[in-house]
Amino acid sequence: MEIRQKISLQFTVIVGVIQLLLYFAIYISFAKSRVDQFYERLEAKATNVGQMLVDIDEINADVLKKIEQNNPLSLPNEKIIIYDHQNAELFSNDTGNEIQMDSALINQVRVDERIRGKRGHFEFLGKFYTSEKDRVVVFVAAEDLMGLKKLSSLRLILVLVFVIGLLIVYFAGHIFAGRAVRPINMVISQVDKIGITNLNARLEEGPNKDEIARLSATFNRLLERLEVSFQMQKSFISNASHEMNTPLTVISGHVEVALMKLRTSEEYIKALTKVGSESKKLNQLSKKLLLLAQASTELTVSNFTRLRIDDLLWQVRRDILTRHKTFIVKIDIPDENADEEKVSVFGNEPLLKAAIVNIIENGCKYSDNHMVDVVMTKETDALVIRFLDQGFGIRESELQLIFQPFYRSNSAEKTEGHGIGLSLAEKVITLHKGKISVTSEVGKGSIFTVWLPIV
């Protein structure tokens, strides 16, 4: 069901319920008013009849009967019964015995002085009338034909007004809902026109600051992120293809040259050595790309375990020194941070290890002395690891670019690398709810600082 239809129906139901309650209150109020007015007329009649029969000597039961027969103010189907103090009937014009009053009811009238009741279609009132001459119980019963007819007419009018009102409300609500959802339809129409070829298109936010404008603004921010992501993806694919194509071209070239003619063992060994070297580069690049893809998704969170960062740092140092004999890695961990609870984080060991390896290897590669100092300290709720090198530093204009995939500064072009390491490190640290920053001074070196939340 469309939103417009839902709004129309909900609006109709709400107004319908309100109407129903109001009309019900009107009907109940009118019905109560009819009853009260009719019983006031019955009481006035009972008082008048009792007064004539008791207080006026010239009027007896026969005279009263004649008076009531010709009384133009008599109520419809009026019945009058009067009883004396011994419950003997003094007067009655109920020739058909349509209403019967027993002694218990008569005595109750004497106690309560006034009672109301119904006998079939008749509504009656019993009144205890007293004077200096006598005490009588007067019952007056009648049918309120006019009042009931008015009540029936009111009921019919209210039902008709309710039904017609609901129809009017529904169509008015349908028009109102159409105007309300028109901006949404415009947003849908604009979004439908945006595709992969025009991600730079944006929705019209309009001059208003309502929910639709905020929705359009949210869509525009989403489109901006999608456009950036799409451009980054294109750049990533292009750079990755280029980086992988270079060693493949070198391997292919050396193999083709070696196969062009018979060569000496030394020449074959030289060619195979070059092929092996390029193959290792290609293998390392493939591993880094795989780790970068893993670090870009939160699926790896399911593989998180409790890790001791101090142990991880020593493992990284051992692995780096095994591969690079000229590198120097110094680790400084204060004794007060040796407790397991103070150096443990929740994370993915292979990814964290790869991130730390890349930071340290970068520092060693771009330093003349190939040395990195690693200092770990503890803050209130985080471990802080600082990586200090004495390299040629990073220009301030490049500090915000070094974490982009495949970015390499001009000063790093002479050093072998792919520009993936720092990007991988940044994504891994972010995945672990941490953060990484860098400060650098050209000619003096750089300091990379990593914060990781403690378990």
Image (spheres, rainbow, N blue to C red):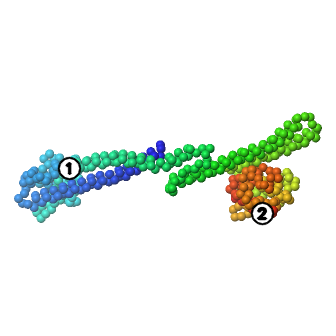
370 lies above or below 177: below
> Where is the C terminus found, in terms of image quarters?
bottom right
Mark found first going from the N terminus, 2 or 1: 1
Q: Horizontally, is 253 left or right of 380 in the view?
A: right
Count of numbered badges drawn on the protein:
2
The disc placed on residue 251 is none
The answer to whether residue 352 shows anywhere in this view is no
* Residue under label 1: 146
Query: x and y percent of residue 218 in the render?
Result: 57, 53
Where in the figure is residue 448, as x and y percent of width and height? 76, 60
Residue topped by disc 2: 441
Q: Is residue 330 left or right of residue 68?
A: right
Q: Amino acid at mark 2?
A: Glu
**Which kind of residue does numbered mark 1 sit on?**
Met
Q: Secondary structure at mark 1?
A: helix
Q: Quadrant of residue 86?
A: bottom left
- Out of 29 and 130, give the one closest to the viewer: 29
- Density class for disc 1 (Cα within 10 Å; few <14, some 14-19, many ≥20) is few
Q: Position of residue 148 (x, y in %)?
A: 23, 49
Disc 2 from disc 1: Cα separation: 103 Å
Between 313 and 450, the one nearer to me in the picture: 450
Q: Residue at x 21, y 54 (%)?
A: 38
Residue drawn at point x = 41 percent, y = 47 percent: 175
Front disc: 2 or 1: 2
